[in-house]
Amino acid sequence: MTAKKSTPDFILVILTLLLLTIGLIMVYSASAVWATYKFDDSFYFAKRQLLFAGVGVVAMFFIMNIDYWTWRTWAKVLIIVCFFLLIVVLIPGVGMERNGSRSWIGVGAFSIQPSEFMKLAMIAFLAKFLSENQKKITSFKKGLVPSLGLVFIAFGMIMLQPDLGTATVMVGTCTVMIFIAGARISHFIALGLIGLGGFVGLVLSAPYRMKRITSFLNPWEDPLGSGFQIIQSLYAIGPGGLFGLGLGQSRQKFFYLPEPQTDFIFAILAEELGFIGGSFILLLFSLLLWRGIRIALGAPDLFGSFIAVGIIAMVAIQVMINIGVVTGLMPVTGITLPFLSYGGSSLTLMLMAVGVLLNVSRYARY
């Protein structure tokens, strides 16, 4: 291990905190009407998001000072714990069900989502495996199958909840890591065809997933049912125009767009801040990914590079899916927008992941 730099990547810290601050403002703006109606407190969601953000920022700066190779040492333990939690969450009476998914463990509004933390545990475990077995990754049996085997077991357990969005992000992140490690494209094509068949099977096995696909292709076919969210999201984005209606002036948050502070917060942001505001958010994410890529390229060892790639891939995939859904380019999935959407587990997990990335940056040469 090379000597540690005195400071982490300052630009990455600023970008993260800026996105977090914008997220807190937008969570309040998007949720104030709904929170007042349901809880008689316009700050209900904003206060909780501020608490989650505080915990996450403390965790980020704490983890930033833990040498990143510690995650290689504890990778097996972390993934065992996360698998245990994925089992526990499925137990009736223990796991909490929301919107048809049994994905949470906790009490009331304060709960954790084990599948979110599985994403980071899987990144650490896979980074350890790839750094120790990179020469075998070109072999289908000795490299690719072992590296993906555990990923698909976790995918299956998350789908039992079911939570297709989180499972897709995890698989996509791990696929990027394995591809970067040097896996053969021909192997990916073969697995891609198998995966496509499996995806079609998942869609056909659940009528609500088929409705999401058909509503994505033509949301106006069922405007009051499966196409409702996409239509209302587009009704928010369209009137925003170039400069938006003004902060706090959204119309769609008045009970048109369901729970706009969560997965569809970007629609409210685009409505209130317009094309300029939406583009600024995308610019911030692009800069954050750029800093992450620089850190991955400058990491002093393979484990540091792989864990940095995994974290950046996770953020990038979530941003692309979320924005794609909100703008009607992809079927609706329950994917949060990193740092902006309301949600304790997602926000805390992302800030913890940035903490790991910041520690890698203290050793990176760039």
Image (tube, rainbow, N blue to C red):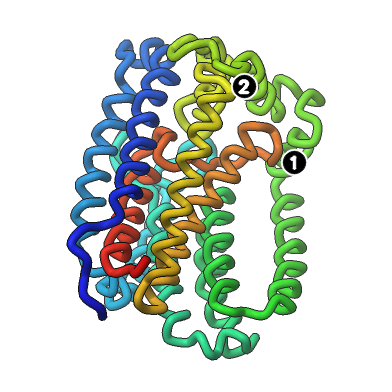
Of residue 172 and residue 194, the one placed in the foreground of this image is 172
- In three-dimensional space, the C-alpha distance between marks 2 and 1, rounded to whole angstroms, equals 21 Å
Residue 13 in the image: x percent, y percent?
A: 30, 47
User: Residue sitting at 66 percent across and 23 percent down?
Assistant: 234
Relative to 288, say whether 308 is above or below: below
Which one is in front in this view, the residue at disc 2 or the one at disc 1?
2
Name the quadrant containing residue 215: top right
User: Residue sitting at 34 percent across and 46 percent down?
Assistant: 112
Residue 218 in the image: x percent, y percent?
A: 80, 31
Q: Amino acid at mark 2?
A: Ile
Q: Is residue 213 visible?
A: yes
Q: How many marks?
A: 2
User: Residue sitting at 54 percent across and 29 percent down?
Assistant: 278
Residue 260 in the image: x percent, y percent?
A: 50, 24
- From the viewer's perspective, is 136 left or right of 205? left
Of residue 236 and residue 202, the one placed in the foreground of this image is 236
| First of labels 2, 1 by sequence position | 1
Of residue 200 and residue 286, the one placed in the foreground of this image is 286
Q: Residues within 10 Å of mark 1 (few under 14, many from 20)?
A: some
Q: Amino acid at mark 1?
A: Ile
- From the viewer's perspective, is 267 left or right of 348? right
Label 2: element kind = helix
Circle number at residue 213: 1
Residue position for label 2: 237
Relative to 143, say whether 124 is above or below: above
Q: Is residue 254 visible?
A: no
Residue 296 in the image: x percent, y percent?
A: 42, 66
Label 1: element kind = helix
Relative to 357, say whether 52 is above or below: above
